[in-house]
Image: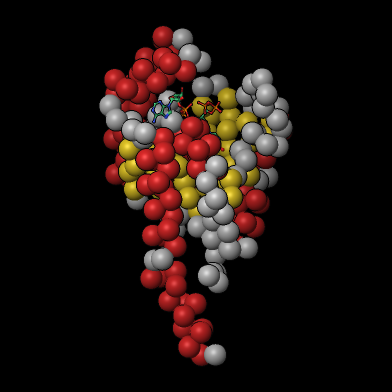
Amino acid sequence: MKRDKGLLIVLSGPSGVGKGTVCGALRKHDTHIRYSVSATTRNPREGEIDGVNYFFKSKEEFESMIENNELLEWAKYVDNYYGTPRKYVEETIAAGHDVILEIEVQGALQVKETFPEGVFIFLMPPSIKELRSRLEGRGTETQDLIDSRITVAKDEIELMDKYDYVVENDEVEAAVERIKSIVTAENCKKERLIHIYKELVKE
Ligand SMILES: Nc1nc2c(ncn2[C@@H]2O[C@H](COP(=O)(O)OP(=O)(O)O)[C@@H](O)[C@H]2O)c(=O)[nH]1
Ligand SMILES: Nc1ncnc2c1ncn2[C@@H]1O[C@H](COP(=O)(O)OP(=O)(O)O)[C@@H](O)[C@H]1O
């Protein structure tokens, strides 16, 4: 279908809820959604490729991106910077493609301020107990860090009101199907189509 502009889809939620896992599973479906690659100052993990998983930057490089207004949003998360390069997102949407950002909650709320027409999806754990067990199962944080992430998660869950949709991540594929349904529905929103159809009638 002909379209004016793509959707900006923001997938967010507490650490350990499964944002990366669900986004990775969504990529395997043929959805035509484009994925924004973030910039970060954290060190690459084994197997991560610059420009594919992240754009790996020094602190100085990242700070100059902030100063030059090259980031749509950015946040400091556990001692590192993470941010969304503005140019790719703006150009891709302008070309009519949907783009997804997988980002933490502070960044998502910044995007909401500057880009309220985005589609904001909060990924919710089935329970705090399950969130804790996912963080423990991932094995990338110490027990102290897990405790502090759980405390932060409780505050983040309070912010779910600010999102358009809440998707429970009980089963990865079920969460992916819910997200695909949201994207389909958003693309059929009357406000997005009215303009296109008015043009058609004129032809
Ligand atoms: N605000 C913001 N958060 C991001 C961005 N890219 C990744 N993140 C989030 O930063 C957090 C840490 O990411 P990472 O170090 O890759 O660890 P992991 O996602 O927990 O494996 C996650 O919650 C990501 O969703 C970004 O561009 N902006
Ligand atoms: N639906 C799910 N059911 C069970 N485990 C899950 C599910 N989604 C993610 N996980 C697991 O939970 C852990 C955290 O997921 P991850 O994608 O790293 O979270 P986030 O990106 O939100 O920090 C990983 O070990 C992942 O395999």
**Residue located at (62% from left, 56% from top):** 92
Query: Which residue is at the front of the view, 73 or 54?
Result: 54
- Asked if 76 appears above or below 122 in the picture, the reply is above
Image-quadrant location for residue 184: bottom left
Q: Residue most toward the bottom?
A: 202
Residue 103 shows in the view = no
So how many labels did they put on this image? 0
The structure's colour scheme is: secondary structure
Query: Which residue is at the front of the view, 78 or 96?
Result: 96
**Residue located at (67% from left, 40% from top):** 65
- In the picture, which quadrant includes the C terminus? bottom right
Q: Residue most toward the top?
A: 143
Percent across and percent down for residue 63 are 66, 34
- Looking at the image, residue 104 sits to the left or right of residue 99; the answer is left
Image-quadrant location for residue 144: top left
Percent across and percent down for residue 128 are 29, 23
**Residue located at (61% from left, 38% from top):** 38
Query: Which residue is at the front of the view, 108 or 66?
Result: 108
- Asked if 55 appears above or below 161 in the picture, the reply is above
- Asked if 47 appears above or below 75 in the picture, the reply is above
Residue 164 shows in the view = yes
Percent across and percent down for residue 187 are 44, 62
